[in-house]
Amino acid sequence: MTLLDLIGWLIVGGIAGWLAGMFMGRGGYGVLGDIIVGIIGAFVGGWLAALIFGNNIAGDPWYITIPIAFIGAVIVIWIVRMVTQGRSTV
């Protein structure tokens, strides 16, 4: 993995995480949190896309990877909210 690949993952993760946070309501998790959720979502979305479509999306263009990462990030946010539902923050 090159430095440009890492920068690309951060950009796609940030965009996907921010979009998923806004889509799911109640705001996001901050810039760093959105990037982390987006990157985890990219892995989850890529894994699901590989299961469903039987291919690896790692080399696909941004207009394919961002929606897949977005879907994965929505799933990750939904799971996190289901696990933390009812817990109050201090």
Image (cartoon, rainbow, N blue to C red):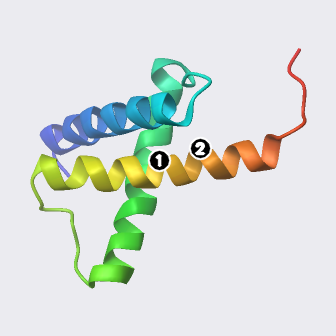
- Asked whether disc 2 touches disc 1, contact meaning CB atoms under 8 Å apart, the reply is yes
Residue at the image position 50 percent from the left and 31 percent from the top: 21
- The residue pinned by badge 1 equals 73
- Image position of 50 with respect to 40: above or below: below
Graded by Cα atoms within 10 Å as few (under 14), some (14 to 19) or many (20 or more), the crowding at tag 1 reads many
Residue in view at x 33 percent, y 72 percent: 49
Residue 73 to residue 30: above or below: below
Q: Indicate left or right for 40 with 90 as reference.
A: left
The residue tagged with tag 1: helix, strand or loop? helix
Q: Mark 2 points at which residue?
A: 77
**Residue 77 location (% of width, % of height):** 59, 44
Name which quarter of the figure residue 58 lies in: bottom left
Residue occupying the far bottom of the picture = 54
Distance of label 2 from label 1 (alpha carbons): 6 Å
Quadrant assignment, res 52:
bottom left
Q: What residue type is labelled 1?
A: Ala
Q: How crowded is mark 2: few (under 14 residues within 10 Å), some or many (20 or more)?
A: many
Number of numbered discs visible in the structure rendering: 2
Query: In this view of the protein, which residue sits in the foreground, 7 or 45?
Result: 45
Residue farthest along the top direction in this orientation: 90
Left or right of residue 11: residue 21: right
Point out residue 59 in the picture as x, y percentages from the top left corner: 12, 62
Q: Could you say which is closer to the camera, residue 90 or residue 2?
A: 90
Percent across and percent down for residue 6 are: 24, 41
Coordinates of residue 30 in the picture (x, y in percent)? 53, 18
Q: Which amino acid does label 2 sit on?
A: Ile
Q: Residue 84 carries which label?
A: none
Helix, strand or loop at mark 2 = helix
- Position of 65 compared to 37: left or right? left
